[in-house]
Image: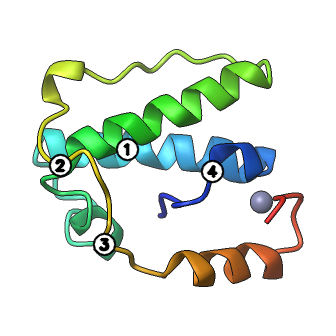
Amino acid sequence: MRIWDISPSKLCRNHLLGEHRELYAMWVVITENKKGYSLHPETLRWKGKLKAMYLRHEQLVSEMITRGYNHQSPLDKRKATGNTKQNDYVDSIKDQISILKKKKCSCRV
Ligand SMILES: [Zn+2]
């Protein structure tokens, strides 16, 4: 359960598509007040920042389209409220880079 703070263009296929799936799930949890993962630190840092989350989703989608993947789960823009910037981190960007490096996937970090 993680939204990366790293440019989508640097993510490997698995991490790009995985993040997109998780972001969508998290968006539903926050916008519909669902219980699943609602207290997860990754979910908490996006509360009140749905606009930032919406923008991250746009970045992921544009990278997915560039790579030729289908996209069929648009977010409701009317729900994109709150802060436009995300600056609370569960792991710092530096730590996120080392987490991805250790996975030895094809992320270009
Ligand atoms: Zn990766």
Q: Which residue is mark 1?
A: 25
Q: Position of residue 50 (x, y in %)?
A: 22, 43
Residue 69 visible to an observer of this rendering = no
Residue found 75% across the figure and 51% down from its top:
10
**Distance between the alpha carbons at the discs numbered 1 and 4:** 20 Å
Q: Which residue is mark 3?
A: 88
Q: Left or right: where does residue 10 sit relative to residue 88?
A: right
Amino acid tagged 2 = Asn
| Quadrant occupied by the C terminus | bottom right
Compared to residue 75, the image places residue 18 above or below, namely: below
Amino acid tagged 3 = Asp
Compared to residue 31, the image places residue 36 above or below, namely: below
Which circle, 1 or 4, is nearer the viewer? 4
The residue nearer to you, when weighing 10 against 28, is 10
- The numbered mark, 1 or 4, whose residue comes first in the sequence reads 4
Residue 7 shows which numbered tag?
4
- Judge the density around disc 2: few (<14), some (14-19), many (≥20) Cα neighbours within 10 Å: some
Q: Position of residue 91 (x, y in %)?
A: 47, 81
